Image: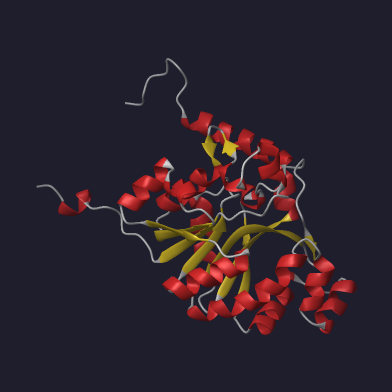
């Protein structure tokens, strides 16, 4: 007798993934280098980088639907993966606001997509394993969580990559462009995020925005990562957590042409690892 459950599609959810693919303007170094309007369309191993991210989000068991954000929705809607997901009712593409934080706020207000994951189109190294690991480590009582990678984790595998590190008394970390908003209260963090957008590469200014006490601890190298998460939560009126990843590649996004070349090499290597060698026999 055939098990009726064997033909069912895997149960998905409960997350909605927000995929930020908006333009960073004419000064974006990757878009300028590639001669394109949007960095999200930069070629990575024969495909636009946003398509790599779409495919990963679609394959993640934690993700039920995807909302992509870009100034011209047709740029994503025309992609093969996007067409399939739209036909399946799993993808919607909407127009971007002037900044990433405003785009996320717009989607939160329009769709109330909680619990939500937020990631970016310039993160083609994102994998389902990274998503599963992140979601499994999010504390049960938080409104906002961000994935981070330790400097030693990144340098152990990719000593040549140049990332922005935030140095604390206990460790140095880099962001991973993957966030979670498990509850509607997470929206409170958007106003605080807008304040940080201009200073995202300037740790001193970010510390100052968290209050004088936090700035003083940062200056004296007495500020820990978890203290920072607590300070962010107080300023933004949310319960916040920073989740550490064991995956070095989670911290490698495409901000510069050098990143584009590195990520292309990594993606190509992954593809070759999945492709059986010519003449090899399939396993019996």
Give how far across and how far down residue 33 sits, in percent: 70, 39
> Quadrant where the C terminus lies?
top left
Q: Name the one closer to the observer, 167 or 55.
A: 55
Please state which of residues 150 and 102 is positioned toward the viewer in this rendering.
Answer: 102
At 54% across and 35% down in the image, what residue appears?
Answer: 270
Say if 94 sits above or below 281 in the image.
below
In the rendered view, does 51 fall on the left or right side of 89?
A: right
**Is any atom of residue 52 visible in this view?**
yes
The residue lying toward the viewer, choosing from 209 and 62, is: 209
Q: Quarter of the image holding residue 177? A: bottom right
Residue 173 coordinates in the image, percent (x, y): 73, 60
In this rendering, does residue 114 appear at all?
no
Q: Residue drawn at (61%, 51%), measured in percent from left and top?
A: 250
Q: Is residue 239 above or below residue 206?
A: below
x then y, percent, for residue 221? 87, 71
In the image, farthest residue toward the top: 279
Residue in the image at 76% along x and 42% along y: 159
Residue that extends furthest to the right in the rendered view of this protein:
220
Q: Quadrant of residue 156?
A: top right
Q: Position of residue 42 (x, y in %)?
A: 60, 40
Q: Quadrant of residue 211?
A: bottom right
């Amino acid at each position: 007798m055939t098990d009726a459950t064997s033909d069912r599609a895997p149960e998905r959810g409960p997350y909605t993934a927000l995929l930020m693919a908006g333009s960073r303007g004419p000064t974006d170094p990757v878009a300028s280098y590639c001669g394109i309007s949007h960095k999200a369309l930069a070629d990575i191993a024969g495909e636009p980088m946003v398509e790599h991210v779409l495919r990963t989000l679609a394959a993640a068991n934690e993700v039920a639907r995807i909302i992509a954000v870009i100034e011209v929705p047709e740029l994503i809607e025309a992609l093969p993966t996007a067409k399939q997901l739209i036909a399946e009712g799993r993808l919607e593409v909407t127009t971007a606001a002037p900044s990433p934080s405003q785009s996320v706020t717009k989607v939160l207000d329009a769709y109330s997509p909680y619990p939500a994951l937020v990631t970016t189109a310039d993160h083609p190294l994102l994998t389902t394993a990274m998503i599963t690991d992140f979601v499994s480590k999010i504390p049960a009582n938080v409104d906002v969580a961000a994935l981070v990678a330790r400097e030693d984790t990144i340098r152990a595998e990719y000593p040549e990559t140049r990332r922005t590190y935030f140095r604390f008394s206990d460790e140095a970390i880099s962001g991973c462009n993957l966030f979670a908003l498990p509850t509607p209260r997470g929206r409170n963090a958007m106003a605080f995020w807008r304040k940080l957008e201009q200073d995202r590469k300037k740790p001193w200014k970010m510390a100052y925005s968290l209050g004088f006490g936090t700035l003083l601890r940062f200056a004296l190298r007495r500020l820990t990562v978890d203290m920072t998460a607590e300070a962010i939560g107080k300023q933004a009126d949310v319960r916040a957590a920073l989740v550490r990843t064991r995956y070095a590649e989670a911290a490698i996004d495409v901000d510069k042409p050098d990143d584009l070349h590195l990520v292309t090499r990594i993606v190509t290597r992954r593809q070759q690892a999945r492709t059986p060698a010519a003449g090899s026999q399939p396993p019996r």
